[in-house]
Image (cartoon, rainbow, N blue to C red):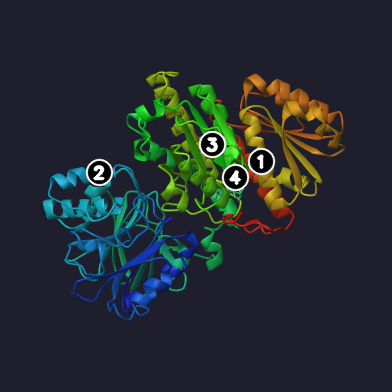
């Protein structure tokens, strides 16, 4: 996610802004910038790509931009490549936004979030004579504020409120207006923001770590509220422009705990960020008219021309492909082959020009996946990348890109990026099925509506974490675990097993339930834990009988199924339920108990959950 900060008070603003931004580096970013204002002089903008130290060097650690009021930003690219032009702050004027220097514009600002209807708003502003220098949604929202500020001539709060009524999406915005020196205006919807105060000074940030050094007295500004921030004092307003009063909170966390938002580890924080990651990813692919993959250049004609799909990935991304294979083939009836990238790159490839090679990768830098992409391109096969990191190598080299909007994922064990990839692939499957005429437009729209309900159902699934933590403690010393399922449940089993292995170091295997009796069941003995995925109604009874065969050999059985399938409790010793949803998409829910089980098992074993031994977040070597 991007990080925003702000300061107005009696000290030099730039050094405080740089220090505050350094406390947000953990969030991941690709560029940074600041705007500082000295009294009534014009604000000075300085931007730099790469690490924050580049911005510090450009500003001589803040000394070259004097002033007591300023805003700053670390950018995690979602719209527009990671470069200086797209770096924040952005301005309401033209052209100069790409460079550093004095700001002639009336409004300058920084933003964390995603403006879903930015293209529609951009066109509106172009029609009113605005020009754009960047590819960002942020420049649009700042020019929209400027538009209302000039049109109604009432003031910043009015202009910000009018923007909030018009914009769809998420934002934490910090703005400075040329006519209001020493003041910062803030607005928030869904993206995090806190505002701190101390004697004669005020601070703004995306997250507590940025300001804990300066104050622990903060306001949590609410959704669709805006604030006027002056030294040591903050005034809040509702959408009508009426003043509202907010209570201050004293932050008791230490800085490190605050980076994890109060969670003990990044992994558990990211598990809880999954609903938002999926919500944001779906919002970028599902509009008023249903699923639209146009942003990736996947037109209906192109999709209709495809006769087969080849998915290539590694690790959890490969598990996404395994699950997508079942869904795409069932819905679109287009043959799908899923291949480990490390195998794909060395085998005799029998691909035809009407195949689409889909490379799934969180980092967009995995060596085997990148090699596979390059081989497909050498063969002249069209390629699609499903990637979380904007501007990553795989994203840049693929013919088409579907970005997941999970934000930076810090824990080595992927969770929210995996879930966002699944959501993107479900959208692809439904759209392909509709284009191929295998489902009607109405059925496609019904499925899109079902997908949009997944984030709330994921929230509900997370509420069961207490039971799962208790269960994990029981099995923290298990020697072997088996995750079994059929169809989509088998693909989910693969991810559950990998999560358990990579962070708890317990040997586990994922198996197609029907395959157990062909040898592996000989490993099952007293106290072996067998976890059966039982969400596929047509197949669950068969998996239950496989589980019962394991119990006959001493296994302890855990079943994961949808609410309503209460017969599972007759067979399993411990049952976990997830909310009902379309059987094609239920994997997004069933995986959450498995992530939690692995996490709590690792914690119970006292292991380094976020940085497991021998593993890297991105395997950029063979
Ligand atoms: C998953 O928890 C692991 N960290 C690993 O399997 C990962 O999914 C794999 O290395 C692929 O990484 P990528 O998505 O960045 O290409």
Question: Disc 3 to disc 2, how far (Cα)?
Answer: 39 Å
Question: Disc 3 to disc 1, how far (Cα)?
Answer: 20 Å
User: In this figure, which residue is indicated by the disc labeled 2?
Assistant: 166
For residue 585, above or below residue 281? above
User: In this figure, which residue is indicated by the disc labeled 1?
Assistant: 496
Mark 2 or 4: the one toward you: 4
Q: How many marks?
A: 4
Quarter of image, res 246: bottom left
Front one among 250 and 374: 374
Would you say the beta carbon of the disc 2 residue lies within 8 angstroms of ligand 1? no
Tell me if mark 2 has few (under 14), some (14-19) or many (20+) residues whose alpha carbon lies within 10 angstroms of its own.
few
Say which element carries label 3: strand
Whichever of callouts 3 and 1 sits on the residue coming sooner in the sequence is: 3
Which mark is drawn over residue 314? 4
Question: Disc 2 to disc 4, how far (Cα)?
Answer: 41 Å
Looking at the figure, which quarter contains the N terminus? Answer: bottom left
Question: Disc 4 to disc 3, how far (Cα)?
Answer: 10 Å
User: In this figure, which residue is indicated by the disc labeled 3?
Assistant: 311
Say which element carries label 4: loop
Looking at the figure, which quarter contains the C terminus? Answer: bottom right
């Amino acid at each position: 996610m991007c990080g925003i900060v702000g300061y107005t008070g009696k000290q030099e603003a730039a050094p405080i802004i740089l220090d505050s931004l350094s406390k947000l580096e953990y969030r991941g970013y690709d560029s940074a910038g600041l705007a500082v204002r000295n009294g009534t002089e014009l604000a000075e903008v300085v931007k730099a790509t790469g690490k924050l130290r580049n911005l510090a060097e450009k500003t001589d650690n803040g000394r070259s931009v004097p002033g007591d009021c300023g805003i700053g930003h670390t950018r995690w690219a979602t719209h527009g490549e990671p470069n200086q032009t797209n770096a924040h702050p952005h301005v309401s004027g033209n052209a100069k936004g790409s460079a550093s220097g004095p700001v002639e514009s009336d409004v300058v600002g920084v933003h964390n979030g995603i403006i879903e209807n930015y293209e529609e708003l951009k066109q509106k502003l172009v029609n009113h004579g605005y020009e754009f220098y960047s590819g960002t949604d942020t420049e649009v929202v700042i020019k929209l504020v400027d538009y209302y500020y000039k049109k109604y001539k009432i003031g910043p709060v009015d202009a910000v409120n009018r923007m909030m009524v018009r914009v769809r999406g998420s934002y934490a915005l910090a703005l400075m207006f040329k006519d209001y020196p020493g003041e910062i205006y803030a607005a928030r919807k869904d993206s995090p923001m806190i505002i701190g105060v101390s004697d004669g000074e005020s601070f703004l940030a995306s997250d507590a770590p940025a300001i804990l050094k300066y104050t622990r007295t903060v306001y949590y500004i609410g959704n669709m509220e805006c604030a006027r921030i002056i030294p040591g004092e903050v005034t809040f307003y509702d959408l009508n422009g009426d003043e509202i009063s907010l209570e201050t909170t004293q932050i008791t966390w230490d800085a490190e705990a605050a980076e994890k938002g109060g969670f003990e580890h990044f992994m558990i924080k990211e598990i809880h960020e999954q609903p938002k990651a999926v919500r944001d990813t779906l919002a970028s692919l599902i509009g008023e008219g249903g699923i639209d993959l146009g942003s990736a250049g996947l037109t209906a004609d192109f999709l209709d021309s495809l006769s087969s799909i080849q998915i290539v990935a590694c690790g959890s991304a490969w598990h996404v492909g395994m699950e997508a294979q079942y869904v795409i083939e069932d819905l679109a009836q287009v043959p799908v082959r899923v291949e480990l990238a490390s195998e794909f790159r060395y085998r005799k490839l029998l691909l035809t020009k009407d195949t689409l090679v889909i490379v799934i990768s969180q980092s967009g830098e995995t060596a085997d996946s990148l090699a596979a992409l390059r081989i497909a391109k050498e063969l002249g096969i069209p390629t699609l990348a499903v990637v979380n990191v904007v501007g990553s190598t795989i994203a840049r080299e693929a013919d088409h890109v579907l970005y997941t909007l999970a934000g930076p994922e810090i824990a080595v064990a992927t969770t929210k990026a995996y879930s966002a990839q699944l959501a993107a692939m479900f959208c692809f499957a439904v759209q392909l099925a509709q284009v191929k005429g295998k489902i009607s437009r109405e059925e496609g729209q019904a499925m899109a509506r079902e997908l949009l309900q997944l984030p709330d159902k994921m929230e509900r699934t997370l509420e069961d974490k207490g039971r799962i933590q208790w269960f994990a403690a029981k099995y923290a010393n298990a020697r072997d675990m088996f995750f079994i399922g059929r169809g989509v449940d088998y693909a989910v089993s693969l991810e559950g097993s990998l999560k358990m292995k990579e962070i708890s170091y317990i040997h586990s295997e994922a198996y197609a339930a029907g395959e157990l009796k062909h040898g592996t069941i000989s490993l099952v003995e007293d106290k072996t834990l067998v976890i059966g995925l039982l969400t596929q109604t047509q197949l669950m009874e068969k998996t239950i009988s496989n589980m019962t065969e394991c119990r006959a050999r001493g296994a302890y059985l855990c079943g994961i199924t949808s609410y309503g399938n209460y017969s599972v409790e007759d067979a399993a010793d411990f049952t976990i339920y997830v909310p009902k949803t379309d059987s094609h998409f239920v994997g997004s829910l069933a995986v959450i108990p498995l992530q939690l089980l692995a996490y709590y098992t690792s914690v119970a074993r006292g292991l380094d959950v976020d940085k497991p031994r021998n593993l890297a977040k991105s395997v950029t070597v063979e």
